[in-house]
Amino acid sequence: MDEINKLSRRTLITRAAALPALGVGVATGVAAQQPATGFEPPGVPEWTTRQGGAFINPPYGLPSPFEKDVVRVLPGGNIPFQTGSRTPLHRMHGTITPNGLFFERHHAGVPTIDPDKHRLMVHGLVDRPLVLTMDDVVRFPSVSRIHFLECSGNSAAQYVNTNGKTAQQIHGLLSCVEWTGVRLSTVLAEAGVRPTGKWILAEGADGAAMTRSIPMELAMTEAILAYGQNGEMLRPEQGYPLRLFLPGIEGNMSIKWLRRLKVGDAPFHTREETSKYTDMLPNGQSGQFTFMMDVKSVILTPSGGDKIIPGRFIEISGLAWTGRGRIRAVDVSVDGGRTWREAALQEPVLSKALTRFRLPWRWDGTPLVLQSRAVDQDGYVQPTHRQLVAARGDNYFYHYNAIQSWRVSASGEVSNVQV
Amino acid sequence: MSKSELLVAVACGVLIAGCSAPAQRAVATGAGHYGHGRVATAQEIRGWDIDVSPDGTGLPSGSGSAVEGRKVYEAKCVSCHGVNGAGGTAPRLVGGLGTISTPKPVRTVGSFWPYAPTVYDYVYRAMPWDRPMSLSANEVYAVTAYLLHANQIIDEQTVMDAKSLPAVRMPNRAGFFTPAEDPAVRGVRCMQDC
């Protein structure tokens, strides 16, 4: 991210020379005059002197070509089985992720599903096993909710190293959109869940046919069968035409390209909740069914890869989130965690959604370490990196939510460190 | 159904617009409200009901041993998973026995997976990576038997089927637990002299 350069002597001289020319034009009363050249005033840039582009060019609008670097990226390396693309958190504003920048994670590629041919089956311990079309699904009463989605493997590399450079590379398996769909409880009521039904197997229609077990309590409260994403249908990468969405819960459980819900009386212990998405402790035991995404935050301005200038006011800004509900506070430290100040939160602070925090600041030019630390409505506080690793060891892998430290060097370069 | 639940169900049936099922119980009861969708037939369910539980529920008829399984593996799996399951572009499937509780655990099907039927479930639905659900039941039993044999869990001649596969005891069967307490690590909100 380039900073604006201070005014150069040359620029000042150029501006001073431009003034007499304008003065001459006004004095003689010439009606039309050629605009002065150059994009800075008094010059007039070329785009002000000509027709612009046409409507619907293209019909689905795209960002300015000058934003071409604000895209998703894949982790470095030419490997055949990529794990997922990252959202450019460090280049975004507000709290909502545009659909084209939503992170991707899949296990067998993105399927191309004809919505007219897609079916959802609800069966097992129900009174009426059902087959639903998308036309059926969208005719149920709908709800819309703004929530984040985070992969439980987000930031996993941070447990053991600091190879990631930018906030995108380190924490980019995170996005936040408005989801629209039908409550899962409504669809389950349509099928009539039997009292013995305690767990639901959710299964996808992609080549991985991925499965997870969903506890009934979760299914009956906030779970949504979503088809809308920021006002349009889900993107293919996010599960078009239908997905399960579980607010605040590890992303893997929000099964995409949802084709089947099977009600059972016990967890199904699928590969994704045994071999994967289990948390290994130092004693070799692995914790299962650890669904909750913990409280977390990251400073995005300034952040890894940036270069800042001393003496100028900037706003330290970033995002905080928690699977437990609302963010209560975010504290910021500019001295590596010795002292902290509470940042301002952008209203409205929504439950299980990204929350923007801000703190005005002026860098004095000395090397230092920036940190943010979030507190959620239930009083959970983000741990330090050392605290997290001490408790969990090196092989835990999932649910990394420690405080992110950014070192600012004497020359203003911002880098990923652990202190 | 209790009287109050019946009243709610009836009230919701009458006032369909804007009425959602109350969520105070973890069970949905009462008549369907909207009549959307159609009842699934047994045949339709059978075609999609492909999951296999740890106790073997869902395993189809068929069988195979590591003898046939080696041939399936070498034809369909070795290009990604490597010779003898040593790994390649796709993860290692064999070995790592006894490493799980060490500082450098090697997680494979043999050393880490708690249940043998899950191997059947996963291989049938997701493998081979480029042609999932292309293996026959016999092929899936056979390659499952091959992986179990390569991991020194069963003999080469042992036949895996709907009865014998759930009876296999995996080495890491006792390696999983559901945390009784919240596994979140709680930070401290110190503000000065931290």
Image (cartoon, coloured by chain):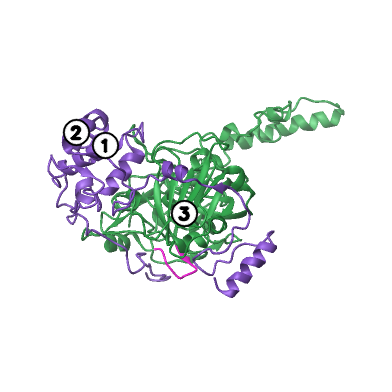
Residues shaded magenta: A374-382
The Cα–Cα distance between marks 3 and 1, rounded to whole angstroms, is 54 Å
Residue A10 is left or right of residue A150, and the answer is: right
Q: Residue at x 45, y 42 (%)?
A: B43
Q: In the image, which lettered chain appears purple?
A: B
- Mark 3 vs mark 1, foreground winner is 1
Q: Which chain does the residue under circle 3 lie in?
A: A
> Please, what is the three-letter code of the amino acid marked with disc 1?
Asn
Label 2 sits on residue: B68
> Please, what is the three-letter code of the amino acid marked with disc 3?
Ile
Q: Which chain does the residue under circle 2 lie in?
A: B
Of B26 and A319, nearer the camera is B26
The numbered mark at residue B138 is 1
Label 3 sits on residue: A299
Q: Main secondary structure of the magenta part?
A: loop
Where in the figure is residue B188, as x and y percent of width and height? 38, 70
Q: Residues within 10 Å of mark 1 (few under 14, many from 20)?
A: some
